[in-house]
Image (tube, grey):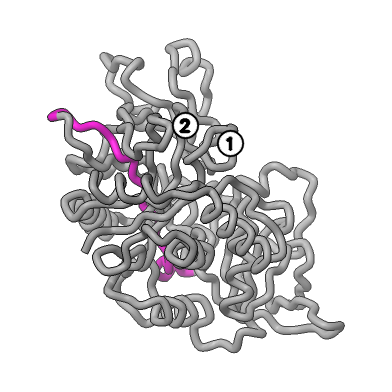
Amino acid sequence: MIPEVRASFNSSFDESHYQALLEDMKTRFDEAAGFRISETPVFISKEAKEMIFSACDAIIEQIGKLDFYALREKYIPEDLRSDTPLEDPHFLAIDFGMCVGDNGKIVPQLIELQAFPSLFLYQNYLGAAYRKFYPAVPIDRFDYLFSEMTAPAYLEKMRRVILGPQPAENVILLELFPEKQKTRIDFWATKKALGIEVVCVTRILKEGRQLFYEKDGKKVRIRRIYNRVIQDDLLQYPDLELPFRFNEDLDVNWISHPDWFNLISKSIMPRLQHEYIPTSYYLDERPGNLDLQNYVLKPLFSFAGKGVELNPTESMLAAIRDKQNYILQQKVEYAPLVKCPDGSYSKVELRILYAKEDEEEHLQPVINLARMGKGKLINVSHATDATWIGSSVCYFES
């Protein structure tokens, strides 16, 4: 997107830089990442940055007008729904594909959004690591952090968001079988940066309305949960017995409330409108004359691309009983964006990450992540043996 910067980076690329980054990551976190790391960061021009944040601002403004208490009754089954106050979400992730627009120019297109934490601490490491090990990464004109934050300020910001007023000992990162998760390197990065423990949901102790975990042979009270449990994962274990229910009225502060996972997600995309938001319909409300070859079928409540059908058919749709739990989203054409040394091109999805402290009124953009691929779906968990694809970060031109 910035040809001279890309050309300079590619001409100076050395495989030893990439291997040094991977080795440093493995040493720092005691294991390699569970997904492929791209050989390159992505460089985003000022023009593209303005388009991306124009869409982000419009999305957030429209989200603010939705009645989420009504949506909670509509989209969350009663046996999963919590009766506790929602409060505000502490996190928002907005995913864009960098696509070919009608005029041939590169434009962002909304792919998905989620009020759920992402790889906040791993991305901070990766953004700094590219600079450390790659001499050609520019420093003066580009940054992977937003809101004019320095790296120390970013860490302090995330400490306030995740810990709030609590000591680190009373805050946990909660996950289901964390050692098996593809994104576990972010758990270790979070523990290393903030001093909180990573605890499996099956190992929680419950006494009345209070929750505890064990550390060094003693029982420690949990007052605040940095929740990383994806509900879709829980459904993969129908016989799993948990020590508490996520919709219980517990004496604990959720970061964020579990209901936000479903409330701000694909479930609201048909309610959003903007030139950088592809048209989408709830499956049970689709127009009768819709040309399916121009649409992708997505289940509302899935994660990491599970259940996505790139080429839906009428027979496929007719077989779906819970049509209210699916959307049809207009297809977009990903741009051949990042030129690779072998002459091929990688496509890019980028995620703008927002965070909010307890006392703040508004979410604030803080950091980003990028995913690169060369296939029809961009998913770092399903990366092939191709090079210059996988997990990355965007450096935005200031």
**Answer yes or no: do the residues labelled 2 and 1 have beta carbons within 8 Å?**
yes
Q: Which of the 4 image quarters holds residue 342?
A: top left
Magenta span of residues: 85-103
* Distance Cα–Cα, label 2 vs label 1: 9 Å
Give the residue displayed 46% in from the left and 36% down from the top: 373
Looking at the image, residue 154 sits to the left or right of residue 361; the answer is: right
Image label count? 2
Label 1 SS: helix
Picture coordinates of residue 360, whole percent (x, y): 33, 79
Instruction: State yes or no: residue 221 in magenta.
Output: no
Residue at which label 2 appears: 377
Q: Was residue 91 drawn as part of the magenta stretch in this picture?
A: yes
Tag 2, which secondary structure?
Answer: loop
Residue assigned mark 1 = 382
Residue 320 percent coordinates (x, y): 52, 22
Q: Nearer the viewer, residue 142 or 268?
A: 142
Quadrant the N terminus occupies: top left
Instruction: Specify the amino acid type for callout 1.
Output: His
